[in-house]
Image (spheres, rainbow, N blue to C red):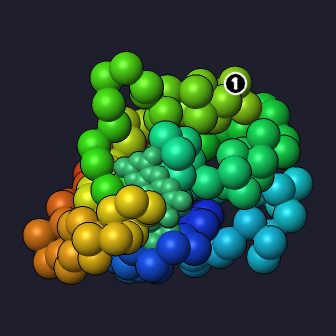
Amino acid sequence: MKSLIVCVSVSHGNTTKVADVMSEVLSAPVVTPDEIDPADVVGYDVVGFGSGIFNMSFHPELRAFVSALPSHQAGAAFLFSSSGFPEPPFRRYTRPLRQTLRQKGFDTLDPFSCRGFDTYLPLKLVGGVRKGRPDADDLLAARTYAEQVRTKVGTE
Ligand SMILES: Cc1cc2nc3c(=O)[nH]c(=O)nc-3n(C[C@H](O)[C@H](O)[C@H](O)COP(=O)(O)O)c2cc1C
């Protein structure tokens, strides 16, 4: 199974911790958008795209990378994120990016999300929230998620 993980993790490295666990399970290299040409993202069985959440969106670098991907993709793709808070029902930021992946031809899998240490102002003033996250339980959940991806994509 040929796998790849593209990750932007600029705030505290929270999402990189998730990406590293998924990378182990899927035997997938983890790259940042500036380490790979979007045109070279072809022929993968599965590609994971992840970042922290900033102002209720995936990181702009990740969104730009996804937009620049070649169309007519044949494999599966999934989104993953770490954020201070769960996705609010009034602003589903996963949906538009998933839609873009679908338009590129990917078979999109349900996303993974966990909490991450958050020092966004004014939370910074109180020392941040979700200290220590992602924790061992979050990383176990990420591992379980990646195992499910491996099973699903590997048997298709
Ligand atoms: C400028 C800024 C904006 C943020 N906006 C949000 C947000 O809208 N929703 C949320 O749940 N967390 C938000 N966060 C928290 C980050 O999503 C969280 O810290 C994430 O784990 C960062 O991932 P990273 O360390 O991989 O970059 C924000 C953090 C910063 C610094």
Query: What residue sits 45% from the left and 79% below the top?
Result: 12
| Residue 139 in sight here | no
Residue 48: horizontal and vertical position, in percent?
52, 55
Left or right: residue 56 versus residue 6 is: left
Instruction: Give the position of the C terminus as an image quadrant.
Output: top left
In the depicted structure, whether residue 144 falls above or below residue 95? below
Q: Amino acid at mark 1?
A: Gln
Tell me where residue 86 sits by quadrant: top left
Give the secondary structure at mark 1. helix
Q: Is residue 152 above or below residue 29?
A: above
Q: Which residue is mark 1?
A: 103
Q: Ligand 1, what quadrant?
A: bottom left
Label 1 neighbourhood size at 10 Å, few (<14), some (14-19), many (20+)?
A: some
Residue 31 placement: quadrant: bottom right
Residue 78 picture location, percent across and down: 48, 46
Q: Nearer the viewer, residue 145 or 44?
A: 145
Where's residue 16, x and y in %? 46, 76
Relative placement, left or right, of 5 versus 38 is left
For image coordinates 72% across by 38% down, the residue present is: 73
Name of the residue lying farthest toward the left = 137
The relative height of residue 145 versus residue 140 in the rendered view (above or below) is above
Give the residue drawn at x 11%, y 70%: 137
Q: Is residue 29 visible?
A: yes
**Total numbered labels placed on residues in the image:** 1
| Label 1 CB sits under 8 Å from any ligand 1 atom | no
Image location (x, y in percent) of residue 17: 38, 78
